[in-house]
Image (tube, grey):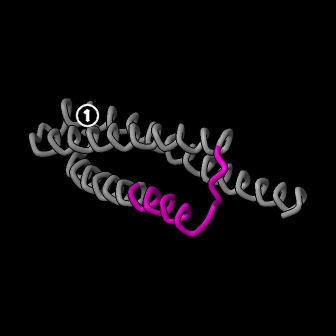
Amino acid sequence: MSSVLLHKIDNQRRLCIQKDLKELNLWMYTLEEFNNELDSCHILEKQLIHNASVSNLIKALRRKNVLSMALFCKYNQELKDEWEYGKTDYDVARAKVHEKKRERYMLLIEEYSAFKKHIYKLLMRYQRK
């Protein structure tokens, strides 16, 4: 292959990895915000709701969040290494790896959305006096 073609292929590979990195950074930012919201929910539970199952749910979601963040940090480093030093083509298999990470993220977001709805329903029971 000509050097021009190899250069184009490498640029395309890097562009795809860069896209994945940007998306991953958004996921990680969202999970950080999710963790901050869990802190607020924990305070609400302690001061107002007083429900052990809600407290346990917050702890479980925090654990999932921390584990997911750790996996995403590791994946972030893998992508950075691949972008900088790798020569592996960005093919269907590589795209499927990223898609699996996206699915994990989306499941966590769906679970967190359901949790927020639950918290809001609990809070609607309280009236300002």
- Going by the picture, which residue comes out furthest to the bottom? 92
Q: Position of residue 76 (x, y in %)?
A: 53, 41
User: Percent x, y for residue 59?
Assistant: 21, 38
From what the image shows, is residue 114 above or below residue 81?
below
> According to the image, label 1 marks what residue?
42
28 relative position to 23: left or right: left
- Please provide percent x and percent y for residue 127: 24, 46
**Residue 98: in magenta span:** yes
Is residue 56 within the magenta segment?
no
Residue at the front extreme, as displayed: 1
Identity of the residue drawn at 25% across and 34% down: 42
Residue closest to the eye, 6 or 70: 6
Q: How many marks?
A: 1
Q: Quadrant of the C terminus?
A: top left
Query: Circle 1: is it few (<14), some (14-19), or many (20+) Cα within 10 Å?
Result: many
The vertical placement of 99 against 78, above or below, is below
**Overall secondary structure of the magenta stretch?**
helix
> Which residue is drawn at the image coordinates 31% and 57% (left, top)?
111
Q: Residue at x 56, y 64 (%)?
A: 95
Q: Does dot 1 land on a helix, a strand or a loop?
A: helix
Q: Residue at x 42, y 54 (%)?
A: 105
Q: Quadrant of residue 92?
A: bottom right
Q: Amino acid at mark 1?
A: His
Highlighted range, magenta: 86-104
Q: Position of residue 55 (x, y in %)?
A: 16, 39
Q: Quadrant of residue 51?
A: top left
Viewer-nearest residue: 94 or 61:
94
- Quadrant of the drawing holding the N terminus: bottom right
Locate residue 51 relative to residue 62 in the image: left or right.
Answer: left
Q: Is residue 8 left or right of residue 51?
A: right
